[in-house]
Amino acid sequence: MNLTLVFFIIAAYLIGSLSFAVIVSRVMGLADPRSYGSNNPGATNVLRSGNKKAAALTLLGDALKGWVAVFAAQQLAPVFGQGATFDQTIAAVALAVTIGHMWPVFFSFKGGKGVATAAGILLALNLWLGLATLGIWLFVAKGLKISSLSAICAALAAPFLCWFFLPVPAYIAAVIAISVLLIVRHKQNIAGLLSGKEGKIGEKAKS
């Protein structure tokens, strides 16, 4: 692994480590999202605080960091001599920013589940791939009002959609890895779904 690739990976990880759920909540004087609801620092849990603006800013920030990390790498990789391994570099960045979000160095390695960040990544990799995956999330979310189930369905579909819209081995491998991580991060939600106790979108946090 060359030093330039290492730099790209570290930079992407640090970008991913910016947990907007925690940052936005602190700036707006709200409770730490890791202290209520699902204890997950993500937009859905921030919404449980009742502050829709904070939830929207969290969603935007987490998605934007995924998009920025991949888009910046796409622009800079050829400039820094990564042209021959362009696809592999971008795939590594996509995975690194995801890991940063899930295990952020700035927040004691306690991060979110990666749904919004993954959406930003997919939109940067390929617009149609991102939109198709988001479409699946929205379809399930609108019908069942369960964010976790929507995310799991989208994660299961993402590798197949990548194979259809962006059939590049490095990207397919990265999307599979991201999808697996996302599903693993939802293991408690899966247990909740199986027991019929999973919360719905917009449901207020229990005091």
Image: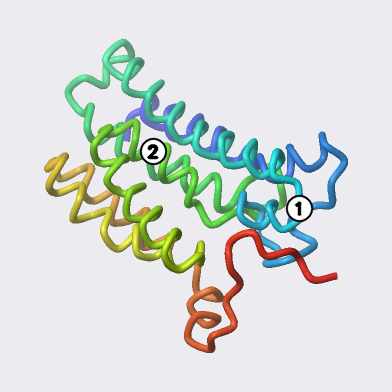
Report the disc number at residue 50.
Answer: 1
Q: Position of residue 145 (x, y in %)?
A: 51, 65
Kind of residue at badge 2 = Ile
Q: Is residue 95 left or right of residue 85?
A: right
What secondary structure is marked by label 2?
helix
Q: Residue at x 36, y 57 (%)?
A: 139
**Image vertical order of residue 7 relative to residue 45, above or below:** above
Task: In the rendered view, tell whether residue 154 sits above or below residue 19.
Answer: below
Q: Which residue is mark 2?
A: 121
Sequence-wise, which precedes: disc 2 or disc 1? Answer: 1
Q: Residues within 10 Å of mark 2 (few under 14, many from 20)?
A: many
Who's the residue at 55% across and 46% down the image?
A: 101
**Quarter occupied by the C terminus:** bottom right
Instruction: Count the labels in the image.
Output: 2
Residue situated furthest bottom in the rendering: 195
Q: Position of residue 25 (x, y in %)?
A: 78, 43
Type of amino acid under label 1? Gly
Say whether residue 146 is visible.
Answer: yes
- Residue lying at 18% horizontally and 55% vertically, measured from the top left: 160
For marks 2 and 1, give the one nearer the viewer: 1
Q: Residue at x 39, y 55 (%)?
A: 137
Q: Determine whether 105 is above or below 180 in the image.
A: above
